Amino acid sequence: MNRLFIRWPEFSYSQLLEIAERESRPLVRRRIMAIAYISQGLMSQEAIARKLHIDKVRIRAWVEHYNRQGLQGLEEIAVLPRRTSPFQD
């Protein structure tokens, strides 16, 4: 599996954790924490996914958003509606 990295490290690991602590929106907080863990380089993508209770595919998407737009990219990720069964009323 390809290793994820932060292309433009605008914040240190500790700075990202401080930003995450101050963030009031839980989903954005979790995204920032994932970026912090990736920037530290000590945890695998799978370990981060387990720690944050998320799918590892989301981490890759968050890193791509962060690499393109910085912290603002983590705030503007569209949340897709859940799929429903065609048989549900």
Image (cartoon, grey):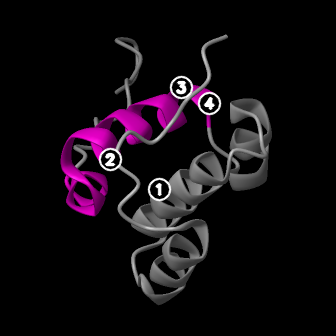
Magenta: main secondary structure = helix
Q: Position of residue 31 (x, y in %)?
A: 47, 56
Q: Position of residue 36 (x, y in %)?
A: 57, 59
Q: Quadrant of the C terminus?
A: top left
Say which amino acid is labelled 3: Val
Tell me where residue 88 sits by quadrant.
Answer: top left
75 sits to left or right of 44: left
Which residue is tagged 3? Answer: 57
Mark 1–mark 2 CB contact (< 8 Å): yes
Q: Nearer the viewer, residue 80 or 49?
A: 49
Identify the secondary structure beneath mark 2: helix
Q: Hey, what amino acid is under mark 4?
A: Lys
Q: Amino acid at mark 1?
A: Arg
Q: Are marks 4 and 3 in contact (CB under 8 Å)?
A: yes
Nearest the camera: 86 or 36?
36
> What span is colored magenta in the figure?
55-76
Q: Secondary structure at mark 3?
A: helix
Closer to the chain start, of discs 1 and 4, is 1
The CA distance from mark 1 to mark 2 is 9 Å
Q: CA distance from mark 4 to mark 3?
A: 4 Å
Q: Which residue is mark 1?
A: 31
Q: Which residue is mark 4?
A: 56
Q: CA distance from mark 4 to mark 2?
A: 16 Å
Please tell me whether mark 4 sits on a helix, a strand or a loop. Answer: helix
Label 2: which residue?
66
- Residue at 22% from the left image edge and 40% from the top image edge: 68
